Amino acid sequence: MAQAPRYLRNCWYVAAHLDELENKDLLARTLLEEPVVLLKTETGRWHALADRCPHRFAPLSMGSCDKGIVVCAYHGLAFDGAGNCVHNPHGPVTGSLAVKSYPLALRGPLVWIWMGDPALAETTPVPSYEWLENGSHHIGLGYLYGLANYQLMADNILDLSHIEYLHPILGTEAVSKAKVEVETTPDSIVTTRHMVDELLSEPLARTYRAEGARVDRELRVEWRAPSLMELTVTICPQSPPGAPPRGSRTLHLFTPETSGSTHYFYVSGMSKSDTSEQIASGFRAALEKAFVHEDKPMIDAQQRRIGPECDIMDMGPAMLSIDKAPVLARRRLRQRIDNERIFRDG
C-alpha cells in the first residue's frame, strides 16, 4: 500500500535566510525529504536544483560552482541554474542529463522555494510581510535545527500557554488566567491570548519600557499553511495614563527536513520608531535563549517519547481546551494535503 503523503507540496517554504548564503556559491539542504542544492549565478541570482547528479547520483553540492555553473566532483558533468547540462567531458550533452530545478524567490531576507508543480508557482503569491521588507523594523534572523516533526513544533507556537512554565522570562501567572480566542478564516487559523493587569518579568518589562507598570498584554498568532506563523505581541501599560502601546513581531517558519527533523527559521522585528537597536538586540537574545535552550530540548525530547515515525494525534493524547488552535491547524493542513493528492491522482 502506498504511503500517505506527508507534506503539502504546492506552496512556498523557506529554504534559507539570505545571510546564510553570504560568501557561498553552494548551499546543501534537505527539504521535504528531497536533497536540494542552492547555487549562485554569475549575476548573483540564486537557483535551486536537486542535489543529485543524473549520472551516478553523486551530490552536486560536493562539487564546485563557478559563474553559476555547478560541476560534479565525481565525473565533471556541469549544470546551469536551470538544471541543464552544459558540459559532458565524456560525450554529447543529451536531455537525459538534465537535473530537476525548483522555483525560488526572494522576499526581504528570506529565500523561498516551491517543492510542487512548478507551473503553479507562477500563479501563487510568495508569502510577504510588509514590516519585514519596508525597513521600518529592527530585524533579527535566527535558525534552529529541530529534531522533531514540523507540526509538533508548530503546535508549540499555536499554544502559548506553555510560556508560563517553560520560559520564565516570557511568562507569568497571568498567562493561564488569560482569555483565549480562536478564529478561522479561509486562509488562516488565528489564536489570541489576552492577559489583563499583568506584571512582566524585569527583562521583559525593560524590553517594552514598562518597568514597574502593570500592563495588558495580547499575544496573537496567525497560522497559514503549511506551517507559517506570525506572532504579534501588544503591550498596553496601565500607567501613565494614555501611554502608547508597544510591541514586537516574530515569524516562526517551519520547513520539514524529514518526518522527524525540521528547519526552523525565525525572524524578530521591533519598530524603529519607538525602539532602539540596543533594546531590539536584547530582545533577540532573549528569544534565542527561549527557542534554543528551552523550546528545542523539550520538543526534541517530546518527539523521542512519541517515536520516530509516529504522529502524536494517532496516539490518542489527552486533549485540553488549550489544544483547539493546534488541532484546527492540523485538520486544515491535512485537508489541504488530501485535496492536493486527489487533484494530482485525478
Image (cartoon, rainbow, N blue to C red):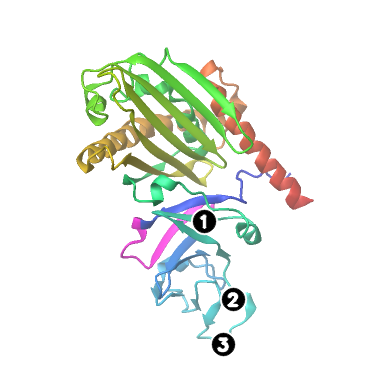
Q: Mark 2 — residue?
A: 97
- Give residue 113's mark: 1
Q: Mark 3 — residue?
A: 91
Disc 2 element: helix
Do residues under tags 3 and 1 come within 8 Å of each other at their CB atoms? no
Instruction: Using the image, determine if residue 91 lies above or below residue 195.
Output: below
Residue at point 50% right, 78% down? 77
Q: Which is more foreground, mark 3 or mark 2?
A: 2
Of pointers 3 and 2, the one earlier in the residue sequence: 3
Of pointers 3 and 1, the one earlier in the residue sequence: 3
228 horizontally vs 26: left or right:
right
Using the numbered discs, state the Cα–Cα distance from disc 3 to disc 1 in whole angstroms: 33 Å
Residue closer to the observer: 196 or 227: 196
* Count of all numbered marks drawn on residues in the image: 3
Per the rendered image, the range of residues in magenta is 19-33
Q: Position of residue 260 (x, y in %)?
A: 50, 40
Q: Amino acid type of disc 2?
A: Leu
Of pointers 1 and 2, the one earlier in the residue sequence: 2
Mark 1 residue crowding within 10 angstroms, few (<14) / some (14–19) / many (20+): many
Residue at point 45% right, 46% down? 129
Look at the image and say whether residue 24 sits in the magenta stretch: yes
201 horizontally vs 131: left or right:
left
